[in-house]
Image (cartoon, rainbow, N blue to C red):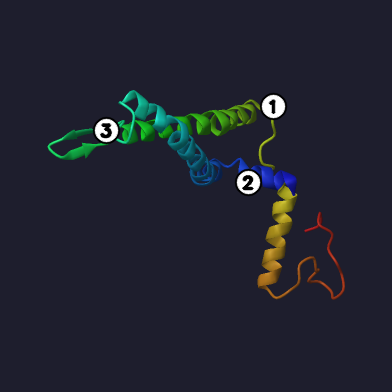
Amino acid sequence: MIKGFKDFLLRGNVVDLAVAVVIGAAFTAVVGQFTASFLEPLIALVGGGGLDGGTFTVNGQVFDWAAFVNAVITFVLTAAVVYFVVVVPMKKIIERRKRGEEAGPAEPTQVELLVEIRDLLRAQQGQGPGRDPSGPGTTVLPGQL
């Protein structure tokens, strides 16, 4: 059960989806609050402080350059954490699998495939799986075809 779950998680598309949705959304909220609480006031101080810090006005139009800098910092911090916490470790796991250090998903054996095919064919013919068509009550062992 754990091995199947591990194989499911290590599929490329599942990992990409998890990174994009769960980690991205949750961590963006944390970084957004960090930049709003700490970086915006620092940027406003650099831009002159007070209510108008981090902005400038041209012909009555207010340009909030501090908000743009804040958004860029939020993006860079989020991307860096996702890269170093999720992408780099996943690349290392995938490289180990390619080198053979970590086993990949287990392939079914030929016997397992043949038993599955036999059971499907019997189910289509109206017989139960593992039943011998030669006589009622006779059970076929998995290795017998």
- Classify 113 as above or below 119: above
- Classify 87 as above or below 143: above
Q: Which mark is residue 101?
A: 1
- Residue 58 % position (x, y): 15, 34
Total labels drawn? 3
The type of residue carrying mark 1 is Glu
The type of residue carrying mark 3 is Thr
Q: Which residue is mark 2?
A: 8
Task: Tell me if 142 is positioned left or right of 53 in this view.
Answer: right
Task: Tell me if 60 is positioned left or right of 79 in this view.
Answer: left
Q: Residue furthest left?
A: 59
Residue at 19%, 34% in the rendered image: 57
- Mark 2 or mark 3, which is nearer to you? 3
Residue at 56%, 34% in the rendered image: 86
Please tell me how crowded label 2 is: few (under 14), some (14-19), or many (20+) other residues with Cα within 10 Å: some
**Whether residue 108 is visible:** no
- Mark 2 or mark 1, which is nearer to you? 2
Q: Are marks 2 and 3 in contact (CB under 8 Å)?
A: no
Q: Which residue is mark 3?
A: 55
Q: Nearer the viewer, residue 59 or 67?
A: 59
The quadrant the C terminus occupies is bottom right
